[in-house]
Amino acid sequence: VTTGVVERGTIGQTFVDWPAEQRFLTPSFTGNGFGSTDLNAVHPDTSPAFSLGVDYPSGSEYAGYLAAVVEHFKIPVATGTTVAAVQADRRSGFTVDLVGHGGRGERVVARSIVWAGGEFADQRFPRLVGDSPVVHTSDPVAWRPADEQRVVVIGGYESGIDIGCHHVDLGSRVTVIDPAHPWDAGDGSDPSFLLAPRTRQRLRDAIGSGRLTLTRGRAHAVRPRESGGFLVRTLAGAAYACDVPPIAATGYGPGLGPVTGLFARRSDGWPALSEDDESTTTPGLFLSGPAVRHDDLRFCFVYKYRQRYAQIAATIGRRFSRDVSALEAWRDAGMWTDDLSCCGVRCAR
Ligand SMILES: Cc1cc2nc3c(=O)[nH]c(=O)nc-3n(C[C@H](O)[C@H](O)[C@H](O)COP(=O)(O)OP(=O)(O)OC[C@H]3O[C@@H](n4cnc5c(N)ncnc54)[C@H](O)[C@@H]3O)c2cc1C
């Protein structure tokens, strides 16, 4: 049996592509020896805090950790190779078209595929009237100093507050617009629905500066102003001026790329998955990463979706009559959730 990873760029490409100012919001700490595996580790015997010596890694630091994991465990990765197309055939499995260096094409067959293409390339923009430019938070341009001018951020969850605080720190006056006012979402304690503690801390400081305005509203139109800059209008008719193109902090889609048609969709548009994270329409195709959702559970952080690596591995292994007992080490390390009913969180205080 041959197993391999195909990566269109380099190992950790998404993290290499993160704007330099962006850091992890989930902290790293080496608790591994005491049953608390580092929240950002992808293997129970590793810890980014230990390897990197930082608690909130930058994208390039985390890419360095991933490269070290690949080297240590001798994982076969074909870098510089893009999965261009995937065809499923119920009898023979999958035909995968790869495009490598210099546009060289190759066709391989696979019995099982785990799609782990991530979300970063699937940026979501708000639907706006007018054709004025809007810059997504994934674009380094959005993080450039705005020379203490006015900045408008559309979207007020994690990335919106992150970039809003960044521009406040640089001296700009920032308005964050969001109809759902996620900055004060209070119920429950799942970080997928609540600002991370570090972000809340930064938010308090930014509000204290007097240069941050958080406002409820749905951005509807962006138009250039005759005097320069842009005007962002909300559906309710409020208008906010900014001197640089508005920043879209409106998140990401599931990023399924060439396997988009091989997954059915839930009513909210996210991929429909079996209890083993397998496509409900294409047996043998699994999804791993931040787009995994089961009912109301969102596996959007490393510490969440890593709980499903062993589940996918065990499902594939058992299907081909392999001994999967070694995976129990993942359960022992607290890195295997096979009963999804126990993931809901509501901390006492
Ligand atoms: C801005 C941002 C901040 C985040 N912060 C955190 C955080 O603080 N903590 C946390 O736990 N999570 C965070 N996340 C969630 C984050 O998405 C994941 O933790 C992580 O990036 C997901 O890993 P992944 O391997 O599934 O996807 P990615 O890291 O995106 O990796 C996918 C890889 O697949 C490659 N690829 C894509 N398409 C193809 C193709 N067709 N052919 C070949 N290769 C392909 C890409 O080049 C990429 O290297 C953040 C996400 C974003 C976008």
Image (tube, rainbow, N blue to C red):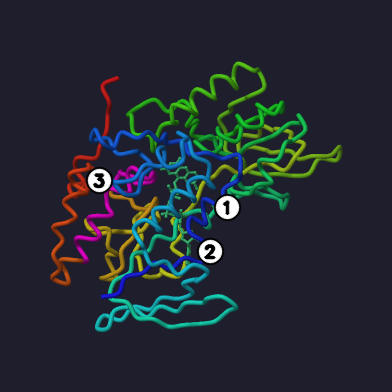
The CA distance from mark 2 to mark 1 is 10 Å
Q: Amino acid at mark 2?
A: Gly
Residue 210 locus on image (x, y percent): 65, 17
The answer to whether the beta carbon of the residue marked 1 is less than 8 Å from any atom of ligand 1 is yes
Q: Of residues 242 and 131, which is closer to you in this image?
A: 242
Few, some or many C-alpha atoms within 10 Å of disc 2 (few <14, some 14-19, many ≥20)? some
Instruction: Residue 17: give its label.
Output: 1
Question: Pointers 2 and 1 in contact (CB under 8 A)?
Answer: yes
Between disc 2 and disc 1, whose residue precedes?
A: 2
What residue lies at 34% left-to-right and 60% top-to-bottom?
287
Check disc 3 and report its element: helix, strand or loop.
loop
Check disc 1 and report its element: helix, strand or loop.
helix
| Quadrant of the image occupied by residue 312 | bottom left
What residue lies at 45% left-to-right and 55% top-to-bottom?
67
Check disc 2 and report its element: helix, strand or loop.
loop
Residue 323 locus on image (x, y percent): 13, 64
Instruction: Residue 335: give its label.
Output: 3
Question: Pointers 2 and 3 in contact (CB under 8 A)?
Answer: no
Residue 346 locus on image (x, y percent): 27, 29
Above/below status of 131 relative to 214: below
Instruction: Residue 126: give its label.
Output: none
On-image quarter of the C terminus? top left
The answer to whether the beta carbon of the residue marked 2 is less than 8 Å from any atom of ligand 1 is yes
What residue lies at 54% left-to-right and 47% top-to-bottom?
60
Instruction: Residue 9: give its label.
Output: 2
Residue span colored magenta: 295-316
